[in-house]
Image (tube, rainbow, N blue to C red):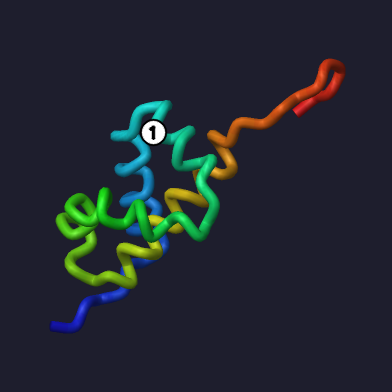
Amino acid sequence: MKHRKKSALEMQRIVADILSGMSLKEKSLIAQMDEKSLPYLQYAFDVYISKTAGDDQETGREIMKRVWQTLQETHRIRIVREGEKS
C-alpha cells in the first residue's frame, strides 16, 4: 500500500500534537539529545505516529526529527552568564 506524503501543514499539526502532550521534563530531555540519538526515540513515538501518520517509517522519522529540531530551538538549556541577554 502506497502512502501519500504529508503536507507541510499536516506535519506541523502532528508535531504540535506531539509537543502538546509532552511534559516540560520530556521536552527538555529530548532537546538535550544529539541528532545521533534520535533513532532511540523512534520506538517511544511509533505507537502515536502510526495512529496519526500511518505505517510510513519515513514520515515517522521526519516527524521525530521535526519534534527534536523544534525542541532544540525552544527547550534547550543554555548557560547564561551574568550580564548576558539571551
Give the residue at x 52% y 51%.
69
Q: Is residue 21 left or right of residue 12?
A: left
* Mark 1 residue element: helix
Residue 47 placement, left or right of 15? left
Q: Residues within 10 Å of mark 1 (few under 14, many from 20)?
A: few
- Numbered-mark total: 1
Q: Residue furthest top?
A: 82
The residue located at (52%, 57%) in the rendering is 35
Name which residue lies at 83% across and 16% down: 82
Using the image, determine if residue 63 lies above or below residue 26.
below
Q: Quadrant of the N terminus?
A: bottom left
- Percent from the top left, x then y, of residue 51? 15, 55
Q: Is residue 20 above or below residue 61?
A: above
Q: Residue at x 27, y 70 (%)?
A: 57
Q: Which residue is mark 1?
A: 26
Residue 63 in the image, given as x and y percentages of width and height: 37, 58
- Horizontally, residue 61 falls left or right of residue 68, namely left
Residue pushed farthest right?
83
Rendering quarter of residue 66: bottom left
Where does the image place residue 11, in percent across and percent down from the top left? 36, 58
> Could you tell me residue 41's position as x and y percent?
35, 52
Type of the residue with mark 1: Glu
- Pick out the residue farthest to the bottom: 2
**Of residues 2 and 31, the one drawn nearer to the viewer in this rendering:** 31
Which quarter of the figure is the C terminus placed in?
top right
